[in-house]
Image: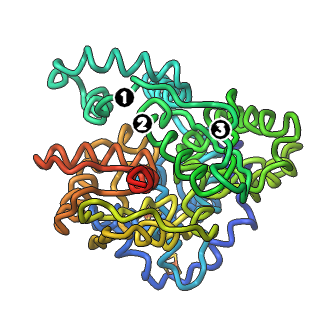
Amino acid sequence: MQHAIELDALRSEVGDSASAMAACVHCGFCLPTCPTYVELGEEMDSPRGRIVLMKEVLEGGLELEEALEHIDPCLGCMACVTACPSGVEYGELLMPFRELAEDGRRRSLPDRLWRGLMLDTLASPARLRWMLRLGRLAAPFRALLPARLAAPLDLLPEGADRAEVGFGVFPAVGEQRARVALLAGCAQQVLAPRIHQATIDVLTRRGVEVVVPGEEACCGSLAFHAGDAPRARAAAGSLLNVLGRDGLLPDVDAVLTNAAGCGSGLKEYGLLFAGRPEEAAAGALAAKVRDVSTFLSALETEAPPPLPQPLRVAYHDACHLAHAQSERAGPRQLLAQVPNLTLVEPRDWEICCGSAGIYNLEEPELAARLGRKKAEALLEGEPDVIATGNIGCLTQIQSHVRRLGSPIPVRHTMEILASAHATD
Ligand code: SF4
Ligand code: SF4
């Protein structure tokens, strides 16, 4: 059988830890929440089908490449985990499978180069700024480009790369109630630096001292979720060094992120470093990671003053927050506290918007179908603004809202809270 060496490694690595394979009772409750099953209608493109495929590869009954046809389109959204009554931890099977399958698969040279370019660019604020400038120059020629090269152009944000995020220590306003480290992230600090400023505003106004380490950039989650664990470990190792230096980690109450994809990846550092020397340090960091909405909703604070005008906010659950971190209540609680703000709940909340890290760049057609449906569902509630807690969702939904001809803005939850506080 082809790829015998890699598959041996795969079996031993995934092996017994893949309780997902044993725990799945094939009930099918997860199927209606799986975006690829809903779109493609094939059992092999469902969580249940994928679990069977991975099991067959591991048992030597199926070629890896045959399974990858159906594993690759998986968004890693984890809606199946939320839906599963048997507690199947699909992610704990998918992530090691993707990592080891990456070594055993046949990727063409252009494919390898393109993936590497995307991951390295998104992980580096300096590179991403350059790429955005090139993208704006290329935008008028979009129709001439192949789908893969055109896809990033459709996601170019308005007003990106025109501001820099702030680093350093931001003292609490009034009595200090907590001290946190806030990760500035990578792509977000270029695509929407206003989110970082809004997060600092909200935290400091609510009595939290914020430390933004200046050297870290990418936490590696983007690469990890794309199956590129070596790249992810390199980035995560740098972050561990930065946070470990000068005793920052033990000196803060939490390590906050305002990007759901990063939060879920950071919490998976134990999986990323399993059996490696960094495992203990990675576990210590993961234990302190919180999404900013989780942290703030647990910190009882006064509500912002009433908004001058009524505001209807349609809230979009980012999969990496709602499914991967089981956090749906926190952001809603924070928004609902704002007087004069009405929360609008869209239909099909559990279905992914199609962003999913670099998925909308790798699988642009399926991602576009999901993006359009999500934008339509959110606009049905006639909101004044759409809120979400993840830069990938924000960019994807904004792009599809615009394509539907709507001027409705998409904002991070922290931006809406910061505007409410600004009326103070
Ligand atoms: S992670 Fe998402 S796309 Fe993948 S099988 Fe589960 S529900 Fe389907
Ligand atoms: S809901 Fe859970 S147990 Fe049922 S088929 Fe899906 S993964 Fe398997």
In the picture of the structure, the residue carrying the numbered disc 2 is 192
> Residue flagged by tag 1: what amino acid is it?
Ala
Q: Nearer the viewer, mark 2 or mark 3?
A: 2
Q: Is residue 383 left or right of residue 280?
A: left
Residue 79: where, in percent of width, then height?
46, 68
Q: Observer-nearest residue: 334 or 74? A: 334
Q: Return the residue at label 1.
A: 160
Q: Is residue 69 visible?
A: no
Q: In terms of secondary structure, where does tag 3 sit?
A: helix
- Decide: marks 2, 1 in contact (CB < 8 A)? yes
Mark nearer the N terminus (2 vs 3): 2
Question: Which residue is at a point 31% across and 69% down the rendered structure image?
Answer: 340
Q: In the image, residue 54 lies at what x, y percent? A: 56, 61
- Image quadrant, ligand 1: bottom left
The label on residue 360 is none
Classify mark 2: helix, strand or loop.
Answer: loop
Residue 313 figure quarter? bottom left
